[in-house]
Amino acid sequence: MEPVYISIPRFALSGGNLVTLSLAKYLSSQGIDVYCCSGFKIKRPNDVTLLKPQRGKLNSFLNLVSFLFLSIHALIVKNYVASHHLTCILNFIKKSRFALVQDIECDFYPQKLRWIGKRLWSNYLSSENLIFTNPHLAYKIGIKSNVQGFSYIPIELPTTFASNQLRNHDVVAVIRDGEYKAPQKTLDVLIELAKRGWNVIAINGTRHDYQYPFIINNLDRDEFIKILSNAKLFLCLSKWEGLGLPNLEAYVCGCDIVSTPIPSGCLLSDLDFESVEIVDSDCSAKLVSDIISTRLSTNGNLRKNNDDAEFLLQRKDSFLEINNTWLCYAKDMIQGFAK
């Protein structure tokens, strides 16, 4: 089998690139000859470090150049794994051997450009073999798949979990660009909760400079995990996510979850319905605030369990097992169809 080249645009820190790099490292550990491609550099998986991206026009331009170079690279090599719909835009010339489908990416586009997104998305799905990160995503797209488990990025639990610590943050949420991420509604809920006296934290991952005392700038992954380890509840109101990795990370860190029915929310609800509350994406901000307030007021005694080290390690180990199942599924796909 010839080497496998996996696209990781710009080696930028993102949920999608974390999943892709994790897969690349696993394949390498299984004896497969793997290279990671950023569009500008090619490295072995263990030599790749994902860096927090910078905002601005220059960054956007470099992203586009990266996508173009990766798409050209896809024409040259036999075993190419596209990880984003723009990393194989030349599929109409030669189809990529694999596409790692992590989201419904045509929804990223503004309404006026949605028709372009749908064409590019259809072009991406024409890749020879599709690898999905979870069964809910495959079902949503309408493609039959034998996907096993779901992708998850293991985290190191802070040592403070060893004691029944008092968590300082009542609610944590991430505000991100894109209408389908529901940034304004998320902000409205947090404003309402703050008025009611709850200690809330909003991590600003948008281009906007919000002026609220509970908002902090975008964090790297280690900083994000530290925040989650000191929180009682994590909120996600996205209308859709390919998976919704922060929900999984928050759950492993001991948080209760209030989420829309995105894949990670549904998966968690199936595993532990007592710790997870699914709210409809059309729920008003006031109703969501009422649900969270009630949960925080009545579930105070559960915090001791959620702060217990053994309890949290059980959560972590169960996810590792599910992720290993998914990694084996992805490896079998690649080994079975690579040339």
Image (cartoon, rainbow, N blue to C red):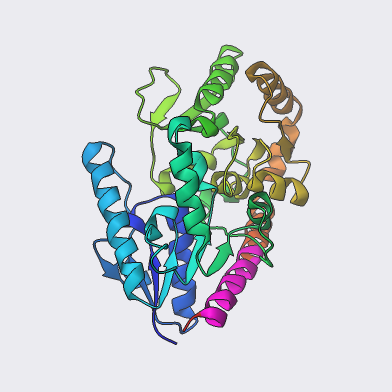
Q: Residue furthest top?
A: 195
> Which of 315 and 187 lies nearest the eye of the viewer?
187
Magenta segment boundaries in residue numbering: 321-337
Predominant SS of the magenta segment: helix
The answer to whether any part of residue 183 appears in the image is: yes
User: Residue 207 lies in what quarter of the image?
Assistant: top left
Q: Is residue 53 above or below residue 26?
A: above
When asked about the image quadrant of residue 293, the answer is top right
Q: Nearer the viewer, residue 295 or 160?
A: 295
Q: Is residue 82 left or right of residue 315?
A: left
On whether residue 54 falls in the magenta region, the answer is no
Residue drawn at x 53%, y 76% is: 334
- In percent of width and height, residue 189 lies at 58, 21
In the displayed orientation, state which residue is furthest to the left: 58
Residue at screen point 61% across, 50% down:
252
Task: In the displayed orientation, state which residue is furthest to the front.
Answer: 93
Name which residue lies at 37% across and 51% down: 13
Specify whether residue 322 is painted magenta.
yes
| Residue 296, horizontal then vertical, whole percent | 69, 27
